[in-house]
Image (spheres, grey):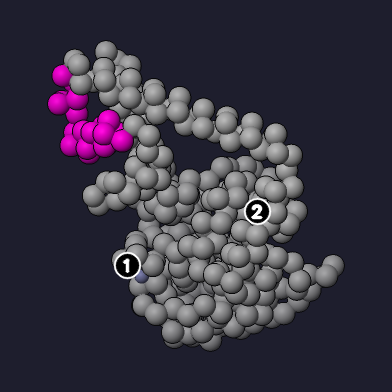
Amino acid sequence: MSFANELRRELALLPVKRPCCRKALLQGLLLGAVAEGAKQVSFRLTEQECATMACEQIHTLFACEPQVVQSGAHGRRYWDLSFSSSAAAKLVRTLQSAGDGQACCVKAVCEGCLAHFLRGAFLSCGTVSDPHKSFHLEFSVTNSGAEHTLACVLELAGYPARRTVREGKIGLYYKDSSSIEELITMMGAHHLIFEVMNSRIERDIRNNENRATNCVAKNIEKSISAATRQMEAIDKLMETGKLLSLDEALRTTAELRYQHPDATLDELTLLHCPTISKSGLNHRLQRLIEAAKDL
Ligand SMILES: [Zn+2]
């Protein structure tokens, strides 16, 4: 069984406690679904456990029993689910009609909602390579509306993805082991995450020591030069008094960076009260640098 199959199975068997998270999970599962007419909804899954779980969730939320057709070709197996629900068809259209500038249609009611959405999205349109071979996690969707919805949630969760278009499909992907580890942990696969971590550690040890040292040095250099640029910008904003004219959020970030010049981005996010996402922090630091550029 491939690592991706194993991960999907583990994710499919996790419990869902809150109704808000159940809704988010189903939104993720339906991200790649097809809605036809007023009521007909169909989608494909690649694991029996996922199909069983999806049927349970659909029964609970939409009070209907999906029809499941199993098929397979070239060593792959598929479970095609179809059911009739106007509420579900409407939900699929909302998920797939989002556009630029529109607010995210997936609402995080509790702190678990985004993780449940991503779990559902991974089960319906995600894949991951075997970490013993390479690090690659990708969500693949077929229309720009679904892409927008997914990209918004990944952004909200603090993991903005890279984008590619392949054979008419849009891929949102990660190649760095830390984002992949964190996303798998967030989705709740606590058993398989150890395999990912072990692979990364093994790979790190295998790597030529000099290369590793160079790489670490380069990363440190990169973050130092980024922090230096931020400090220079903040200095300039303070000297000219322009800092006072910026909004409170930017002033807070500027003060925290100024007081903690050596903090990593992760540490800086935690110093904020309430804490902010890494992408939010990056955005603010970028705005500070832009503001200083105008001077
Ligand atoms: Zn929730």
Can residue 37 be seen in this snapshot? no
- Residue 137 falls in which quadrant of the image? bottom right
Q: Ligand 1 is located in which of the four quadrants?
A: bottom left
- Sequence order check: which comes first, mark 1 or mark 2? 1
Asked if the residue at label 1 sits under 8 Å from ligand 1, the reply is yes
Determine the residue positioned at 55% across, 50% down.
178
- Residue at image x 31%, y 21%? 233
Q: Position of residue 13 (x, y in %)?
A: 56, 79
For the residue pair 200 and 131, the one nearer the viewer reads as 200
Q: Is residue 253 magenta?
A: yes
Left or right of 239? Residue 160 is: right
Q: Which residue is mark 2?
A: 201
Question: Is the stretch drawn in magenta largely helix, strand or loop?
Answer: helix
User: For the magenta stretch, what is the residue range?
Assistant: 241-260
Q: Tell me if label 1 and label 2 are in contact, CB under 8 Å.
A: no
Q: Residue at x 74, y 67 (%)?
A: 2
Callout 1: SS: loop
Give the residue type at disc 1.
Answer: Cys
Q: Which mark is residue 110?
A: 1
On-image quarter of the C terminus: top left
Amino acid type of the residue that numbered disc 2 sits on in the rendered structure: Ile
Tell me where residue 174 appears, x and y as whole percent: 59, 48
From this viewpoint, which residue is outermost toward the right? 74
